[in-house]
Image: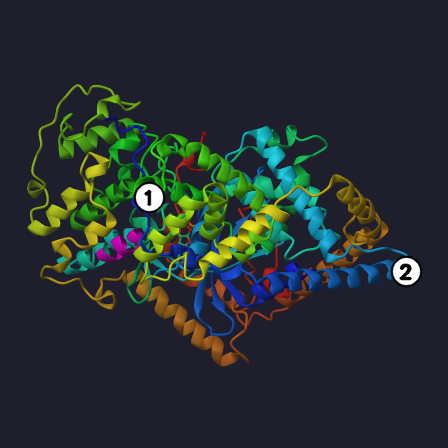
Amino acid sequence: MDAVERENADRQKRWAKEQKVGEGTYAVVYRGREVATNRKIAIKKIKVGQFKDGLDMSAIREVKYLRELKHQNVIELLDVFSSKTNLNLVLEFLDSDLEMIIKDRSLVFLPADIKSWMAMTFRGLEFCHRNHILHRDLKPNNLLTAADGQLKLADFGLARDFADPGHKMTCQVITRWYRPPELLLNARYYGSAVDIWSVGCIFAELMLRIPYLAGDSDINQLDTIFRALGTPTEQEWPGHTKLPNWHQPSTTYPKTPLRDLFTAASADALNLLGKCLVYEPRKRISALEALKHPYFFAIPFPSHPSKLPKCAAQVAVRAAEDAEQANIDQNSTGPGVRAAEPGSRKRKLNSPEEFRARSIARRLDFAKQANSP
Amino acid sequence: MSVDSPSPAPAPPKKPLYEASTQFKHWRYSQESLADVRSKLNEAAVAVIRQTFEAYEPGSSSNVSFLNANEEHLLVTFYVTRITQLCGHFRFPEEVEATAATYLKRFYLKNTVMDWHPKNVMLTALFLATKTTNNPISLEAYTHNIPNTSPSDVLDLEFLIAQSLGFEFAVWHAHRALWGICLTSALQQLPSIPPDYAKSQSSVYDTALNHVRASRLTDAEFLYTPSQIALAAFSLTAPEIAQQWLESKQTLSESSPTKIGSGVLGSIETIKSIIINAGQRPETEAVREVDRRLRLCKNPEKVVGSKAYLARKAEEEKKAEERRSRKVASTGEGVDPFGDELDQPKPSLVDYDDDDDDD
Ligand SMILES: Nc1ncnc2c1ncn2[C@@H]1O[C@H](COP(=O)(O)OP(=O)(O)OP(=O)(O)O)[C@@H](O)[C@H]1O
Ligand SMILES: [Mg+2]
């Protein structure tokens, strides 16, 4: 065996794969354990053979960026190894996401909870932007939460670096409801402000408990934004009418104060929200500035992550898994035991619908589209 | 001003992010450790290949003249120059070329040319680099433009290369650092900058860039930081400005031990001499000679279709077969304390048959 193969085999042995927990557009995700410590991990398995152009771009981006980024609020890539024709990403185990939490009607969010999630989101994002990396797919579903309540940016399949400001980029990124107006107008030069808009939408969604700017088509999305925030004037967004996809809208919507919709929000919260949703990308607040915004320093202070609301379903699954694990540990000779067979049976017995529901392929079909140079 | 136009350069980063990179952590060497890695790799490879020769035909290895570490290195360097040619042909950006060169060079810190010929590795490394730098091109378009190359030639090695790189795809490049130096030196109004510097600046950049390109034929990137290499290249072009730029930097960053630390002057001089002395295309004759000998000493197990290759494949297949039957036996015979209910493999994204955890 070659040294390289041997090294790969050694890596592989460090991780035990248990049952399947989800399926995305290009990968299947399994729960697993680190053999040495018994720590819970996730293995994202990507079959490489299915792509005629070899290793697929989403996988490459995800590996490239997560290999470099180590931060409390960015999902940690623990290891990468290959098995035959599959690429396996070993990730820290994060079994809940903000979308599930927002949708769980049994949960009540305190203003301090929202502030805590926002602070963690901005911290993770500031770190990405400081490293000149754009995420380009921020939405509640990609903000995962750990058992201890920490929020982590995940899914770097659309990320790219923006070290080169004069570089044309594709505007076909970011899920529609979270996509900023400049991308809807097909701007090809853009920057970190695109992610900030998405965070603004997420902020609003946390307060409203439903998506804030939910357009039902790409064309309708812009109209939805204008309706909510007023049609932009040349003054507030110089040059926007020269963007490739601009069409003079038939109706001009007036500005309505955010306060009309967000009746319960504090003035600080609305001020920060407004700064994330500024039309002119260059005037939008940066992640670093956002972290210094008075909102984060005003009372109530952000909730401690461990005190944040958690999905009841997820808590139940965790308890079941832990019980199961204890059961296995009792019957086993050591921590390295394979729990795959009994585990997958049990999963079927409990089979929470959440797991199905979470696996809706949500990657937009343009995600795989290559950048035109 | 239109939004759809390049915005001005963003503020330079405050913290040396480079020091958190995989490049900084895993791909830096000293001259000695680099030589050591290469000679150990070479010795191990020769031992294995010699054994393989003997196993199939006793006595057959005695008159084979194996390559030594320097010869292997010469061949790899030659194929770095081939990357440049191909990139010119495809009009790939600098980023792609620089990344592919780094991949090729890193690959041969983990592998030997006697197992994997750099001609093939180079083609795959370049294809991989187009993707990792976000300049993807279809495999068909790629191979169509390269004579005698089929898509599978490129794909067959992609995984091996990615593995050899430790899946560390991000590379910090000297040409980017050079751009930064040129911009800031122009802005700083250093004393010796001639009045028309702004105009001549692009030619200073171009000349320095050529030195950076030459550095890719050397070990500089394994020994020094991208900024140091960039500064050396700049210094070869405009020594006085480089000197002043460095001084201004050092007073600025007294407190932060950044990329350009103290004792840097000596390093810069060393890099300059490395670029001048080693930054050249290897002699064609010497390369030809090494390549000719490589044909006789390459690992027969890696030559598709050879007796040794087929024997190895058969051996692997046998092992896999054993593994499969073991698996069937263990799941079929109620090792599962809860009884039957086997997971039926269904057609899906991943290869369910791929029993990763078994060995
Ligand atoms: N780190 C993780 N820990 C635990 N479960 C995870 C983890 N990552 C992913 N999952 C589970 O696996 C599912 C699939 O994840 P993946 O990231 O491949 O796809 P996705 O984000 O749902 O969709 P897409 O691939 O379309 O972006 C997730 O919905 C989630 O249920
Ligand atoms: Mg995903």
The dominant secondary structure in magenta is helix
Scheme of image coloration: rainbow
Amino acid type of the residue that numbered disc 2 sits on in the rendered structure: Ser
- Determine if marks 1 and 2 fall on one subunit: yes
Q: Which quarter shows the N terminus of chain B?
A: top left
- Figure check: A248 above or below B204: above
What residue sits right under mark 2 in the picture? B62
Q: Residue at x 62, y 61 (%)?
A: B34
Position of B356 compared to B299: left or right? left
Q: Disc 1 versus disc 2: distance between alpha carbons?
A: 66 Å
Position of A269 compared to B134: left or right? left
Q: In x, y percent, where is residue A151? A: 30, 59
Q: Report in which chain the residue with disc 1 lies.
A: B
Q: In x, y percent, where is residue B195? A: 33, 33
Q: In x, y percent, where is residue B113? A: 72, 51
Disc 2 packing (10 Å; few <14; some 14–19; many ≥20): few
Q: Report in which chain the residue with disc 2 lies.
A: B
Say which element carries label 2.
Answer: loop
Disc 1 packing (10 Å; few <14; some 14–19; many ≥20): few
- Figure check: B176 above or below B28: above
* Magenta segment boundaries in residue numbering: A119-126
Position of B308 compared to A216: left or right? right
Locate residue A364: give its quadrant.
top left
Amino acid type of the residue that numbered disc 1 sits on in the rendered structure: Pro
> Is any atom of residue A239 visible in this view?
yes
Disc number for residue B191: 1
Count of numbered badges drawn on the protein: 2
Which sits in the foreground, B137 or A15?
B137
Say which element carries label 1.
Answer: loop
Q: Residue at x 17, y 19 (%)?
A: A250
